Image (cartoon, rainbow, N blue to C red):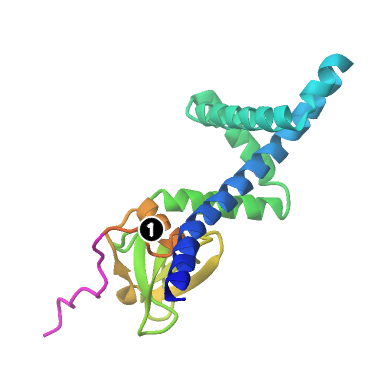
Amino acid sequence: MIKTRRYILAGLLAIIPLWITWLVLRFLFQLLVKAGAPAIQWLASKLPESLKGFLESPLFTNFFSILLVVAVLYGIGRLTTIVVGRRVLGFFEAVLARIPIVNVIYGAVKKLVTVLQEKPGGGLQRVVLIDFPSPEMKTVGLVTRVLTDTSTGRELAAVYVPTTPNPTSGYLEIVPLERVTSTDWTLDEAMAFIMSGGAVAPDTMNYDHPPDPGGE
């Protein structure tokens, strides 16, 4: 009986990472297929009936949709690196800025992406540790910006705390700067740590607060 439980547990531990990987890949696959499907349908409507059936087959539709979306993303990426592309993107953003609600959502998401590519202020690293959900525990967070208290001038950090294993959901915490512990982890290392439930991570981390230079 003990060996049976041990084998079942070993099988479960082997399946979990495969299952999570499959869920992520399936989500990306369905997203790409859904994004490319309208182009496939439009192209099929322009072709003879003899080719239309082949083009609308699930296998070809899925494969071509993925290739089409990847090609478009690659083209947009290349376009944004040249002057003309940046002007086109600027015009597009100017149009979005005039649309209520859309401008707020697009602006917030764009700002978040930009912020995560830069180093935060206050002498902090991007990846930090904060006391959460209690003072006796710490969790990994991402500093998005540094704020200043209007009454005391105290510096505060806005820290996004992703959840495991889905980092797209989480909590936003306002933490005094002196209670934030900077780490030497990169953003990629932090995301791997979070998504793997702590199994994938560097061997060391800055867990304790640095000593106060003015203390005894």
Residue 135's spot in the image, x, y percent?
37, 84
45 left or right of 59 in image: right
Residue type marked 1: Ala
Q: Is residue 31 above or below residue 185?
A: above
Quadrant of the image occupied by residue 75: top right
Q: Which residues lie in the magenta part?
A: 203-216
Pick the front one: 200 or 90: 200
Q: Residue at x 53, y 56 (%)?
A: 20
Residue 200's spot in the image, x, y percent?
36, 58
Residue 187's spot in the image, x, y percent?
38, 53
Q: Residue at x 50, y 63 (%)?
A: 12
Q: Secondary structure at mark 1?
A: helix
Quadrant (top left, top right, bottom left, bottom right) of the C terminus: bottom left
Q: Is residue 68 magenta?
A: no
Principal SS element in the magenta part? Answer: loop
Residue position for label 1? 190
Residue 98's spot in the image, x, y percent?
70, 46
